[in-house]
Image (tube, rainbow, N blue to C red):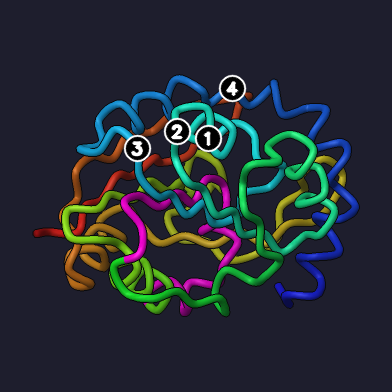
Amino acid sequence: MEISKLSNVYDKLAEAYDRKRSLFNIDEIVNEFRADLDVDRGSLLDLGCGTGVPVGSLFVRNGWDVVGVDISQKMLSLAHDHVPEMKTVCSDICSIDFDASTFDAITLVYSLFHIPKNKHRELLGKLYRWLKPNGVALFTYATKEFTGRDEFEGYIDFLGQPLFYSHETPGKLYRLLENVGFQVVSGKNYSIANETFLWVTIRKPM
């Protein structure tokens, strides 16, 4: 999906997405991720932060410095209302850049699978560079249970709007992560609001 189209779709979805966010209750997963981190308070990069809830809001409440990046200005306007302490940047997550070893943790919740497969390696390489040694990232990955195919690249309706999704098999994903240099900490399917996605935690070695 072209970046401008993705931005337009999420601008249209912003208010409905915000109203229906409670249907996609991921608080327990995000809380568990934060609790397992080696630092009590640190710096988090939330790529595809949306309205700032629940990831940004949870980390800010626990004393973290959070940078939220999203392609939709309307999503970020809502994020400013919900989590005014979070620094926000309106950008394509594939285009933005940060200094090496900047963040203790990075999250990509419901965002990586909107990126074409041929860009996954480059983006994951950036995550590796941006994380501090021993830093950890959490991301969601589309699955056969969601798309109906072992591998997929195409459009699926979400809240009445066509959204681009892509994924490889889990085996190919794990090999890619290891080739980039990550340690795969965990990978588990969760079904939330009748959508099944793979939630993956990865670590940059010391």
Q: Which mark is residue 60?
A: 1
Residue drawn at x 28%, y 40% as measured from the top left: 187
Q: Position of residue 15 (x, y in %)?
A: 88, 39
Left or right? Give the position of 133 relative to 154: left
Q: Magenta span covers which residues?
A: 102-121
Disc 2, SS = loop
Inspect the image, locate mark 2, and give the three-letter code of the amino acid beneath it: Gly
The image shows residue 170, relative to residue 145, as above or below, that is below
2 or 4: mark nearer the eye: 2
Determine the CA span between mark 4 and mark 3.
24 Å
The image shows residue 191, relative to residue 11, as above or below, that is above
Of the numbered discs 2 and 4, the one sitting upstream in the chain is: 4
Disc 3, SS = loop
Q: Position of residue 74 (x, y in %)?
A: 85, 53
Task: Specify few, some or many for label 3: CA neighbours under 10 Å numbering under 14, 14-19, or 20 or more.
Answer: some
Residue drawn at x 79%, y 65% as measured from the top left: 7
Determine the CA span between mark 2 and mark 4.
22 Å
Q: Is residue 52 magenta?
A: no
